Image (cartoon, rainbow, N blue to C red):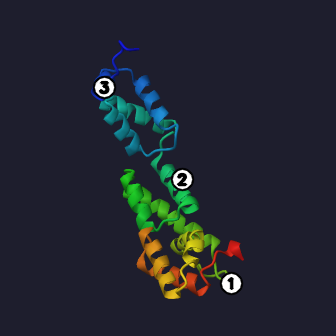
Amino acid sequence: MAGRRRETYADARARRAAIDDPAVVLEAAARYLEARSRSVHEVRRRLTGAGYQPVLVEGAIARMTELGMLDDAVFAQAWVESRDRARPRGERAIREELRTKGLDRTVVDDVLEARRAAAAEHSTDADGDQPSVSAERAAAERLLARNARALSRVADPRQRRQRAYALLARSGFDPETCREAAGSFVSAGGVDPADD
């Protein structure tokens, strides 16, 4: 072991740049996708950053797209669903996250429109005519419910509303949604329904 020299980052990049076998690049892309799904932009950035030839990277991306392993629309949908389930965010924050993942604006617009439509379908008023809660408001309420215990420790209702508003604003919700959800939360007593 003492005689072996550890490969440096520059040496590894040079070794990868010399690779001309598309199967090796395809395998590297598949390994990158093992942990979680990725956008095309993320895969491209990872492989070119590792030193693989751009033409081979594009070939691997094209092949993975053909196989259905890479699909920005499916990735964006899964990202939004995961956010809504695990860490609710406002539309503005979700847009920014997806932008940093390299997704096209039209893909993001389509996914967020589907989110709004799904929320409208699942949430109607007593007559069944009008949506009573938007997707944005529903996500805000879920976030407040998750943080209800910490927020309920604030004795002053005005300060509790301010903290709820700040939490929502930091999570990318628009000011109107922050105001309405924080106000409703405090009016309802600001307690987690699971605690009742």
When the figure is inspected, residue 155 is found, relative to residue 52, above or below; the finding is below
**Mark 2: which secondary structure?**
helix
Name the N-terminal-most of marks 2 and 1: 2
Task: Answer with mark 1 or mark 3, whichever residue precedes in sequence.
Answer: 3
- Please tell me the numbered disc located at residue 69: none
Which residue has dot 3 on it? 8
Residue annotated with mark 2:
78
Look at label 1 and name its amino acid. Ala
How would you rate the neighbour count of disc 1 (Cα within 10 Å): few for under 14, some for 14-19, many for 20 or more? Answer: few
Q: Which amino acid does label 2 sit on?
A: Ala
From the top left corner, tell me how far across and down residue 31 is, in percent.
48, 32
Residue on which disc 1 sits: 126
> Mark 2 packing: few (<14 Cα in 10 Å), some, or many (20+)?
some
Label 3 neighbourhood size at 10 Å, few (<14), some (14-19), many (20+)? few
Residue for point 69% across, 72% down: 194
From the image, state whether disc 2 or disc 3 is nearer to you.
3
